[in-house]
Amino acid sequence: MSKITPISPKKSQEARDLYTTGIESYSTAQTQLLSDIAISLNLDELNEELINEVLAKLGEYTDVGRIVLGKKSEDNKTFSFVGEWVAEGVETISDKFDHFKYADIPTFYDELFGKGIWYFSDRKDLPKELKLLEKVNGTFAALALPVYVNSKAWGGLGYDVMEGPRIWSKEDIHLMMIISHLLGLALAKCPL
């Protein structure tokens, strides 16, 4: 895995332009995103449409090609997709992988729920077991964070970068961890 370091200020700003138009600072943009998502998730009902709306907000902010929300199976062997957002021109994967098997990527489950994060910054550094991702969906870089419901591992929130490597900034990882937590709170209140 690559070291987590901030991306250049120029690239960082470019990646946020879609979401931050008219917002004065990066910190303000983060606060606005968190507010938007918290308000969206603070309803008495949670459904696929609402989940995909939240994923779309995340997609606009993070400038990634795909975001998926997946739920792990009770036997901890598979991961099924609950929601997916893709940028224009990016192919969906939820149709291809109704149930993603952890055995296809052995390190995924252990790192996601053991370390609390799974990521890679550049596909050229992928171990052989992860080459499946490159072949199947064209991902250059990825980040996945766990979603816990009532302190139990429920699933994960995954971000796929489709164009070039991505160094994940500590600030963005922290923000995405908070959003994973907000999703967990919403799912505890309104299970899918």
Image: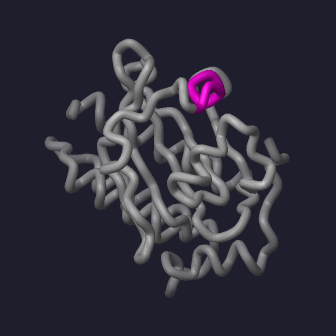
Against 103, residue 34 (above or below) is below
Query: Which of these two is toward me, 122 or 62?
Result: 122
Residue 122 sits above or below residue 77 on the image: below
Which residues are the magenta region? 105-112
The residue most toward the left is: 45
Residue nearest the viewer, comparing 34 with 121: 121
Q: How many marks?
A: 0
Q: Nearer the viewer, residue 58 or 2?
A: 2
Is 170 on the left-hand or right-hand side of 62? Answer: right
Whole-percent x, y for residue 75 in the image: 38, 12
Q: Is residue 78 left or right of residue 4?
A: left
Q: Is residue 95 left or right of residue 141?
A: left
Q: Please name the residue shown 35% across and 54% down the image.
A: 84
By what rule are the colours in the image chosen?
A: one colour
* Residue 16 located left or right of residue 167: left
**Picture coordinates of residue 40 (x, y %)?**
28, 55
Q: Main secondary structure of the magenta part?
A: helix
Quarter of the figure with residue 130: top right
Q: Residue furthest bottom?
A: 22
Above or below, 187 relative to 64: above
Is 181 within the magenta? no
Name the residue: 41% across, 42% down: 182
Q: Quadrant of the C terminus?
A: top left
Q: Quadrant of residue 25?
A: bottom right
Q: Which quadrant: the N terminus?
A: top right
Q: Residue furthest top?
A: 75
Specify the quadrant of the image occupied by residue 67: bottom left
Residue at 52% in and 52% down: 136
Seen at 41% across and 25% down, the residue is 78
Residue 70: horizontal and vertical position, in percent?
39, 38
